[in-house]
Image (cartoon, rainbow, N blue to C red):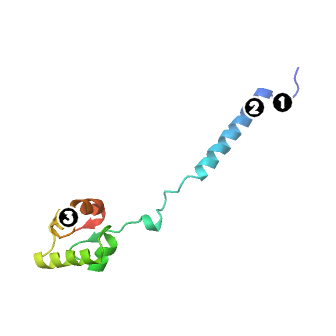
């Protein structure tokens, strides 16, 4: 009769479970944290009816200061934008630019 408290199969099973646990913990540690996005990933919305040209140029991807100044000029001439799609009326701004930035634009 075996007087030892450990069985070979039981020891192997425990060793496998420990290995699996450590492998899982190690792989989880390498995953990125989703608690707080990096500062570069945080997008701030910009109101196209109140923002300055400098604010528009900084916030809208594909828009430099000259186009941002054209947005402000259009806004002043026409009394503000009634929709985001109206941005395509500004010379040099296309549908693609509006769509690419739609999530961060407000009225």
In the visual, does 16 lie left or right of 76? right
Query: Of callouts 1 and 2, which one flags the residue occurring earlier in the amino acid sequence?
Result: 1
Q: State the mark number for residue 12.
A: 2
Q: Check disc 1: other Cα within 10 Å, few if <14, some if 14-19, many if 20+.
A: few
Q: Which residue is labeled 1 in the image?
A: 5
Secondary structure of residue under mark 2: helix
Question: At 70% across and 40% down in the image, what residue appears?
Answer: 18
Quote the CA–CA distance across marks 3 and 1: 74 Å
In the visual, does 41 lie left or right of 62? right
In the current view of this chain or complex, which residue is farthest to the front? 92
The answer to whether one can see residue 52 in this image is no
Secondary structure of residue under mark 3: helix
Q: Which residue is labeled 3 in the image?
A: 84
State the image quarter where residue 20 is shown: top right
Q: Check disc 2: other Cα within 10 Å, few if <14, some if 14-19, many if 20+.
A: few
Question: At 26% across and 79% down in the image, what residue appears?
Answer: 53
In the visual, does 91 lie left or right of 1? left
Q: Check disc 3: other Cα within 10 Å, few if <14, some if 14-19, many if 20+.
A: some
């Amino acid at each position: 009769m075996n007087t030892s408290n450990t069985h070979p199969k039981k020891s192997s099973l425990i060793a496998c479970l420990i290995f699996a646990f450590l492998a899982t913990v190690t792989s989880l540690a390498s995953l990125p944290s989703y608690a707080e996005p990096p500062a570069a990933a945080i997008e701030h919305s910009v109101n196209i009816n109140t923002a300055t040209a400098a604010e528009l140029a900084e916030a809208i991807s594909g828009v430099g200061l000259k186009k941002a100044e054209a947005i402000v000029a259009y806004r002043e001439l026409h009394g503000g934008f009634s929709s985001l799609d109206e941005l395509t009326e500004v010379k040099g701004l296309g549908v693609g630019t509006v769509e690419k930035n739609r999530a961060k634009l407000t009225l």
